[in-house]
Amino acid sequence: MLSDVTTPQDLDDRFRETLAALATPSQRRDPARPVTDDTTLTGARALDLFDAQAISRQLDLAGRWLRSFGEGYYTIGSAGHEGNAAVAAALRATDPALLHYRSGAFYCVRAAQAAGWTPAERPEADRDGTDQPEADQPSGERSDAERSDAERVGTDRPAAADGPVEAAPGDPDGPGDGSAPDASDAEEPTGGAGSAVDRPLRPGYAEAARDVLRGMVASSGEPLAGGRHKVFGRADLAVVPTTSTIASHLPRAVGMGLAVERLRRLETSGRRDGVPPSGGGGATHTSWPPDAIVVCSFGDASVNHASATAAFNTAGWYDHTGLRIPVLFVCEDNGLGISVRSPKGWVETTLRSKPGVRYFSADGGDLLRAYEAAAEAAAWVRRHRRPAVLHLSTVRLMGHAGADAETEYRSPGEITADLARDPLTATARLLVGAGLATGEELLARYDEIGWQVRRIAEEVLDEPKLTAPADVVAPLAPRRPARLARAVADAAARAGGPGAGARAEAFGGKPPELTGPLTLAQSINAALADGMLDHPQMAVFGEDVGAKGGVYGVTKGLRDRFGVARVFDTLLDETSILGLGLGAGLAGMLPVPEIQYLAYLHNAEDQLRGEAATMQFFSQGAFRNPMVVRVAGLAYQEGFGGHFHNDNSVAVLRDVPGLVIAVPARPDDAAPMLRTCLASAAVDGSVCVFLEPIALYHTRDLYADGDGEWLSHYAEPGAWTGGHVPIGRARVYGVGSAEDVTIITFGNGVPMSLRAAATLADEGIGTRVVDLRWLSPLPVADVIREAAATGRVLVVDETRRSGGVGEGVIAALVDAGYVGAARRVAGVDSFVPLGPAARHVLVSEEAITQGARTLLAR
């Protein structure tokens, strides 16, 4: 008797019992022909998909086995979802895929496709009634002699004499264009007992199994994350890693679709005006053909997540405007989110109601129907360049993960009913019923695959793990300051040399260095324009950045200069704005999205933390999503405010590993810092947040009305190299003797501290004002040097006392062994209120002056 909880043994026993009971087919079917009269899937390929499903199942069993003796660290499996093998088979190896964590069979099929297997039975045009050429496929398979033992099943016994004839090199499984085979190019029928067992595994299957097992044991040899996480991902398979258990990768998929289509249109029209950002390191759209589509999969519970809602809404919104986004969403619906049930009919109703998104559906346990539905959906998206969703009904076997006690929320009858819908068993029944194999043959095949997977699992157990902090963080955020400096110098040379004419035209004959002193907003505007000129794939987008030119005029005129394809307005949703940036960066563009206010970022910050910052970390740099996020923020706006427009909360950003945070206070810092961020994104794939103090956008004066001391001239290209601002370097101002006290600050604190220093200078007190400029990474070396110069440090932190920037500065001093006096002046732990009340919770010049005096009086 089977237990009430679906254990690995339960699942294995039920599968064996079912196959043993299957009747021997009365006659054999030619595996080169379709499995049934109403499908295009051939028997040979159905057998191969069974292999992928069996490998996925055996990987799940191996994961539980590894965990049983403490050597496996991941037990969320794909059992019950093996139908996604059909989805992979209906796509091309060059269609970028973002997969959820139950995608073992899909991953195996994709690995086989990349190794030369062409699973399409006929051109997709035949399904959709259009002439759609197939993408180029890799050349042929390796011969038996070239395959490793791990890529063959039954390698320790001779192949059956009546086994299938291998396809000729360069002709895997038939015609490379995916057309239906005819008698002249079909594989010969198998016919003999054991033939379904003795077929060699497809190249790539065993390699995919090794990838997954390495992830389970956190092996540093895992090809993508290198032991940092268990992911489905590999650059050569066009599988982009997703680390979330929910739907946070869906906005990125929409962004990828938008970027892929934009680049396709440029290439098709011959108007492509550049190449992806230089600097190397990372897969880009150059790996994907112009007619590629993006596929992303997720579970039914994720339909309810805000990120999924944002992604569907954005795809439909753009489709409604006529802008095409070729994305195929795949919802694998097993009816459960851990223990929470999806109400019956809710997922279908939800997916069908998405405007602008075409709906397809199939039973994920029926290999043939799932394949046909997936092929139809993929063909529709590829032809129309529009979004669609494929809704696959599935089951979940063996619970959510290894520690899941299903009986706490499921009845024994429900568990037994799901066992009866096992997709691996259903595929076996299909193959036996079609005369392609016997139950005995398939069980022997299953056991051989299991033996091979177990052998690989034992091999990866001995592989090294990450052993040092430096090894763990190595791919997190590469910093190559010499290359950044060179990139800025090269940009300067282009702007002053071969690009001088285009630059003069873009600025209407009067470049910014000839227009007189600029405000902070004007300097950022000019630097954005120079960036657009130097980076052909750079795009600026966000709410109101196009026609309006930004609510503060920072992007004014950019759309007129560079066109609506490169400067455009988005819908009002920060999750989608960042998702567009993530996808565009992955596709080879240099996105510069704008978040209109810092307070608006918080509902979307996981797109930075969970998606953007993790990409290089979990792919060892194989994938990058370079991005410079402009955010208008901080406080001190006069006559306009409340906490939504005066937000001083940056702790959540400083806590994101690898994120670069720049805060320019002056116009003559803003332009070079923005150039540095753009170079860092292009060269190192960095994710940068360019936090712009709103209250300083249009500030002109420093000490007195009309003095113009907060205006600065824009540097001509010849001066860009000398004025380069490296990441993590502060700016120091000396006031008076500069020997008595060091004030460390940033943003709005800089002009306030300079005014306070002037007051102190009248009292004979010399001050060093240190503008951090970079909140992450902090300019620790500069801070320590300037603190030691006076022995008295006043940290002026306009963010909050708890979790504010000042805590990091003080901690850096303590860690460095600083023994002088230190004091903080920081914002109150409060949201910023409306009107004059804000003055009671924000740092003031008077508080800075008094803080310095108190420090000196010690």
Image: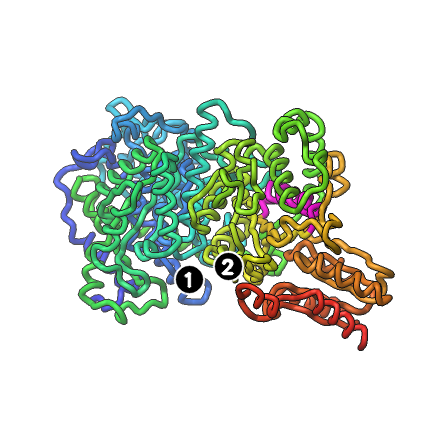
Residue closest to the far front: 705
Q: Residue 817: percent from the left, percent from the top?
A: 76, 69
* Most foreground residue, 787 or 100: 787
Q: Residue 644 carries which label?
A: 2
Give the number of the mark in front: 1 or 2.
2
Magenta run includes residue 486: no
For badge 2, the amino acid type reads Phe
Quadrant location of the C terminus? bottom right
Q: Based on the displayed image, in which of its 4 quarters is residue 505 positioned?
A: top right
Q: Residue 66 carries which label?
A: 1
The image's colouring method is rainbow
Q: Give the range drawn in magenta.
A: 666-686
Secondary structure found at label 1: helix
- Residue sitting at 48 percent across and 53 percent down? 607
Residue closest to the far bottom: 858
- Residue sitting at 38 percent across and 50 percent down? 310
Quadrant location of the N terminus? bottom left
Circle 2: is it few (<14), some (14-19), or many (20+) Cα within 10 Å? some
For badge 1, the amino acid type reads Leu
Q: Residue 104: percent from the left, percent from the top?
A: 36, 50
Tell me: residue 554, above or below residue 60: above
* Most foreground residue, 726 or 576: 576
Instruction: Say which label, 1 or 2, has the lower sequence index.
Output: 1
Q: Residue 264: percent from the left, percent from the top?
A: 44, 30
Q: Residue 413: percent from the left, percent from the top?
A: 18, 65
Distance from label 1 to label 2 (Cα)?
Answer: 50 Å
- Residue sitting at 75 percent across and 68 percent down? 849
Tell me: residue 3, above or below residue 359: below
